Amino acid sequence: MPDDRLYQLHAGICQTLANPKRLEIIDHLRGGELGVTQLAEAMNIGQANLSQHLALMREKGIVLARREGVNVFYRLSNPKIIQACDLMRQVLLEHLEKGAELAGSYRK
């Protein structure tokens, strides 16, 4: 039964990451810690909307928050999150390339 719990956790993380804005947050945080204002400006998104995404990501353990006065700074909780996202991106790019090759072979 321990595998069931792991599958549940895995699905919950994948569900959290199944949002383009959250993936963009990860991409921005790959260089290190950023404040909410910096992230909002870089992503061209309102702070309220960004805060909702960050709260969910914090709840799932994807990001960690640090308060300094009135400012809140976020960073990824584990560098392997970047590796996982990069690996999935490579899989998707390969899939798209194969699809383009197949589409090209049908046109000939």
Image (tube, helix red, strand yellow):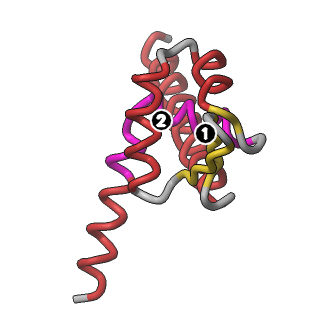
For residue 19, what is the image quadrant? Answer: top left
Q: Residue at (57%, 47%) from the top-left corner?
A: 85
Q: Residue at (45%, 10%) from the top-left corner?
A: 107
Q: Residue at (44%, 47%) from the top-left corner?
A: 57
For badge 2, the amino acid type reads Arg
- Helix, strand, or loop for circle 2? helix
> Mark 2 or mark 1, which has the lower sequence index?
2
For badge 1, the amino acid type reads Val
Residue 35, compared with residue 13, is above or below; it is above
Cα separation, mark 2 vs mark 1, equals 17 Å
Is-magenta flag for residue 86?
no
CA neighbours of label 2 inside 10 A, class few (<14), some (14 to 19), many (20+): some
Which residue extends farthest right?
Answer: 31
Which residue extends farthest bottom?
Answer: 1
Residue 95, percent from left and from top: 50, 37
Comparing 108 with 101, the one in front is 101
- Helix, strand, or loop for circle 1? strand
Q: Which residue is mark 1?
A: 72
Comparing 4 with 99, the one in front is 4
Residue extent of the magenta highlight: 14-30
Residue 20, percent from left and from top: 45, 29
Residue 36, percent from left and from top: 60, 30
Is 38 left or right of 102, judged from the image as shown?
right
Q: Residue at (54%, 25%) from the top-left corner?
A: 101
Give the main secondary structure, helix, strand or loop, of the magenta stretch.
Answer: helix
Q: Which residue is mark 2?
A: 22
Is-magenta flag for residue 15?
yes
Position of the N terminus by quadrant: bottom left
